[in-house]
Image (cartoon, grey):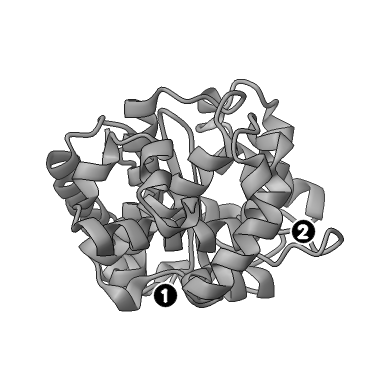
Amino acid sequence: MGVVRTDKWLLYYMKFWNEKKTERERFLWQQKLFIKPISDYFREHKVNELHHYFLALGLVHPNVNVKSLDNQPFRENLWKVAQQKFLHLRKKWEGPDIPIFILPIEREREDLIRDVGGKTGVSTESMICLFIDPFIKKEQLFSLIVHEYHHICRLERTKNLEETITLLESIIMEGLAEVAVKEEVGQKALAPWVNNYNLEECLVLFDYYYRDHLLLKGRKNYRHLLNGDRKAGIPRMLGYSIGYMIVDNVIEKNHYSTKELLSMSALTIYKKSSFSK
């Protein structure tokens, strides 16, 4: 499958967007063009629920005129470049052939700019959906593809499910995926949350928030620990930052490659790090 030609969806979406005069009409138009074609990969969600979920993740709001999408990405043949990167990773990591959908991100959301650099994605065991800025740089696009496709490859090897995956595995998954970005694209392409804390700070925060909950199962039960929770005093993206520090620490000590770590258990990786002491 690889990268789906959602550029054609976008052109058609823009062509008739101006004819939709109310917010409801625009919402339904976006749902028809962007959500329904992907909904089979999210059978646990009704189409309307999936639409709101994508909007929460970063999909551009239906009221936003996305005429800027008719410019740079199409001239640079973004979809072709993305496909080439996917094929390279699939061969290198011996990963599965899955579809990748590219949709426009909401450019006015400060949290998306601050936390993930104006790009984000979501993966299941059988697909990836990327939300990007129309003027994204090639390196940023590559970093997002690397990060999300690494999740796919990791899930294929570990056979984890949403309900059974532990907090430790989720933390390690995020760390592995971002270290893969550094390996494939370079230090400058890393997500902003990588630099939120240094190793010493992460060690202290890990002891305080995470050590006693590592075997907690089911993402819904620890999402606040992974993403941060202002009410609980847990800093934003802390689980991601700690995951990166754990994996980076292990690689620095043992000189593993991303591919070597793909099949290694989260517990083994953790025990090889300074965080297990």
> Few, some or many C-alpha atoms within 10 Å of disc 2 (few <14, some 14-19, many ≥20)?
some
What element does badge 2 sit on? loop
In this picture, is 32 found above or below 46? below
In this picture, is 215 found above or below 86? above
Residue 262: assigned label: none
Tell me the kind of residue under disc 1.
Phe
Provide the residue designation for mark 2. 229
Camera-side residue of 137 and 89: 89
- Residue in the picture at 33% in, 45% down: 150
Tell me the kind of residue under disc 2.
Asp
| Label located before the other in sequence (1 or 2) | 1
What element does badge 1 sit on? loop
- Residue in the picture at 65% in, 22% down: 44
Q: Residue 187, percent across and down?
A: 30, 75
- Which residue is situated farthest in the front direction here? 277
CA–CA distance in space, label 1 to label 2? 31 Å
> Few, some or many C-alpha atoms within 10 Å of disc 1 (few <14, some 14-19, many ≥20)?
few
- Report whether 128 appears left or right of 34: left
Provide the residue designation for mark 1. 135
Question: Is residue 29 visible to us here?
Answer: no
Q: Residue 180, percent across and down?
A: 29, 56
Q: Residue 195, percent across and down?
A: 49, 77
Camera-side residue of 98 and 205: 205
